[in-house]
Image (spheres, rainbow, N blue to C red):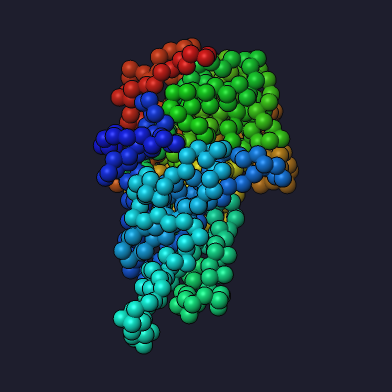
């Protein structure tokens, strides 16, 4: 780990952000992880390092998330900050915005000017000086002061012009046109995972630029709005993680791992799937202060394990677990806006059957092969296809896939047979968002329009500093199996229908880790039990983390040195 060297001095009244005159960090108290807020100033500096690619006198404006209510009620869901804004500012509160002068790095945080009634319901109102100290920015202004801030940046005098000397100075400035024309960069661009488009907050600037009612309208009219430059640059900044970001992601992945272990130790046949979700959430929050999970928990057992994004509102992990079921639990902790994404697959009764063993080992071997390949300069597409190859080998061993004597596994991969059993991509970038941005940016490989490969969330070449999930899986999805075994399918001749019938209720198995790409390989942040011996050991109540690493090929570098948190919260 790379723990931040921050000294605690004083604790602000309404939050758990501890500050000193020169530094501050966020934690949830007790022994929970301390996130240095220099993480966000570092991110701002990284963005500003691209100033040579920006227009002259660029001013970056980022709008934070807004407070909302549920439908037409006054119920306020727990606020979750907008991801790009969080990346640059680390601000927890809603209804804020930020300005960064790209060529100097000067940062102004724009905050709500709360009415006095706010304090009755939400707690003491911070002063601007407290906001400034809390989030380590150069200036704090109220949202409604945006026009004044812009004019000051443009070097326009906003106060009253009373003296003759001031008047002469203003006239001289007009003649020489010394006001600083600025280009305001607004974020606008597509998200390659959701297909949604980040809409630029032009509504904030349109009234200012079109108004002719103020004495500064001529100056404001010189502002240029740019909605094309910022998005690819800022998204690329988020792809390569800083040391502080990597340390935080390692922490949330280790906490996620131990939350999975706690769940595995306590889950039993006859329990409900949602009780597995509850166990996970309880451990993560009780021991690590993690109030949020990064995405909707997936706790699919038996046939439900073949539903890739099970656990949604219409299928809320609400099926009873049966003896002999294979459980696929995909859950990740989030802490101060950064999340993890880890999947464990295990038999509900703690002992693998022969069927479960061969499929599980195929998925585990897929991880091993990928970790052996990973490193700076490796093609992610090649990693995906290598994982498919290992899964097909396991299916050949199980008698499900038939390999003709005159063909190779590589040829089956090329014809896309692997996509029948692993229709999703091998993994995705991870950071503030579970499916973090940057997968398909300009200048990088485009999406491949082939089965399985079209589901890859990136086709990029790996670079040191990336954090990405590795999540091979093997599933028996009824609709895909039916299509592949139909007489008209090119895959029909390679599949044994009689053996496939025996796996109809199997569901699926997936193993998912969070890894950091390095110059010469990768570091696996996940410290879950992975070998069959390890899984069965934990489900018998055995000690974890272990005393020895059974499979060093998985690159779990902190497996033996990690100091575990309390494994038995008192309410269980």
Please state the horizontal and vertical placement of residue 115, each as a whole percent of the image: 54, 48
Q: Residue at x 48, y 36 (%)?
A: 334
Q: Residue at x 67, y 31 (%)?
A: 316
Q: Quadrant of residue 544?
A: top left
Placement of 96 over or under 227, stated as above or below = above
> Is 161 situated left or right of 194 in this image?
left
Placement of 361 over or under 245, stated as above or below = above
Q: Nearer the viewer, residue 6 or 538?
A: 6
Q: Nearer the viewer, residue 119 or 388?
A: 119
Q: Residue at x 41, y 18 (%)?
A: 566
> Is 538 situated left or right of 309 in this image?
left
Please state the horizontal and vertical placement of residue 536, each as a whole percent of the image: 48, 16
Furthest residue to the front? 163
> Is 5 situated left or right of 322 in this image?
left
Q: Nearer the viewer, residue 261 or 401?
A: 261
Placement of 407 over or under 269, stated as above or below = below
> Is 229 situated left or right of 352 in this image?
left
Placement of 43 over or under 61, stated as above or below = above
Please state the horizontal and vertical placement of residue 486, each as a whole percent of the image: 73, 42
Please state the horizontal and vertical placement of residue 567, each as a whole percent of the image: 43, 17
Q: Quadrant of residue 421?
A: top right
Q: Quadrant of the N terminus?
A: top left
């Amino acid at each position: 780990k790379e723990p931040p060297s921050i000294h605690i001095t004083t604790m602000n009244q309404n939050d758990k952000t501890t500050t000193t005159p020169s530094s501050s960090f966020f934690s949830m108290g007790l022994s929970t992880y301390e996130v240095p807020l220099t993480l966000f100033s570092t991110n701002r500096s990284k963005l500003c390092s691209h100033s040579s690619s920006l227009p002259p006198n660029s001013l970056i404006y980022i709008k934070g998330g807004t407070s909302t209510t549920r439908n037409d009620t006054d119920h306020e869901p727990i606020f979750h900050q907008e991801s790009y804004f969080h990346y640059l500012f680390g601000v927890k509160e809603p209804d804020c915005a930020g300005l960064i002068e790209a060529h100097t790095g000067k940062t102004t945080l724009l905050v709500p000017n709360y009415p006095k009634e706010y304090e009755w319901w939400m707690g003491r109102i911070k002063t601007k000086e407290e906001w400034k100290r809390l989030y380590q920015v150069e200036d704090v202004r109220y949202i409604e002061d945006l026009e004044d801030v812009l004019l000051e940046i443009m070097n326009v005098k906003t106060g009253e012009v009373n003296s003759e000397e001031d008047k002469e100075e203003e006239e001289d400035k007009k003649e020489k046109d010394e006001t600083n024309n600025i280009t305001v960069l607004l974020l606008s661009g597509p998200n390659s995972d959701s297909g949604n488009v980040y809409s630029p907050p032009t509504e904030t600037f349109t009234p200012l630029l079109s108004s002719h009612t103020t004495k500064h309208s001529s100056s404001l009219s010189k502002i240029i709005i740019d909605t094309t430059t910022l998005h690819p640059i800022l998204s690329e900044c988020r792809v390569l993680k800083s040391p502080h970001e990597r340390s935080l992601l390692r922490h949330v992945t280790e906490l996620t791992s131990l939350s999975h272990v706690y769940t595995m130790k306590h889950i039993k046949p006859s329990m409900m799937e949602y009780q597995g979700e509850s166990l996970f959430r309880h451990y993560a929050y009780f021991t690590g202060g993690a109030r949020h999970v990064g995405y909707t928990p997936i706790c699919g057992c038996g046939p439900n394990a073949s539903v890739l994004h099970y656990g949604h509102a219409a299928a809320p992990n609400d099926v009873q677990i049966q003896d002999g079921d294979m459980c696929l639990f995909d859950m990740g902790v989030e802490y101060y806006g950064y999340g993890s994404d880890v999947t464990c697959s295990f038999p509900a009764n703690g002992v693998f059957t022969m069927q479960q063993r061969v499929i599980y080992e195929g998925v585990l071997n897929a991880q091993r092969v990928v970790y052996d390949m990973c490193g700076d300069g490796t093609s992610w597409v090649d990693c995906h296809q290598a994982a498919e190859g290992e899964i097909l080998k396991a299916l050949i061993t199980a008698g499900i896939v038939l390999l003709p004597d005159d063909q190779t596994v590589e040829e089956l991969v090329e014809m896309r047979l692997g996509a029948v059993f692993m229709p999703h991509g091998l993994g995705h970038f991870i950071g503030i968002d579970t499916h973090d941005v940057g997968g398909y940016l300009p200048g990088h490989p485009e999406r491949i329009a082939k089965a399985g490969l079209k589901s890859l969330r990136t086709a990029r070449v790996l670079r040191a500093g990336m954090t990405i999930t590795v999540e091979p899986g093997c599933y028996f999805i009824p609709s895909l199996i039916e299509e592949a075994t139909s007489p008209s399918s090119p895959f029909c001749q390679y599949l044994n229908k009689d053996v496939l019938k025996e796996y109809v209720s199997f569901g699926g198995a997936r193993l998912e880790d969070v890894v950091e790409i390095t110059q010469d390989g990768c570091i696996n942040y996940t410290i879950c039990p992975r070998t069959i011996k390890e899984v069965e050991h934990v489900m018998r109540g055995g000690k974890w983390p272990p005393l020895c690493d059974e499979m060093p090929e998985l690159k779990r570098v902190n497996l033996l040195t990690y100091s575990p948190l309390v494994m038995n919260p008192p309410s269980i």
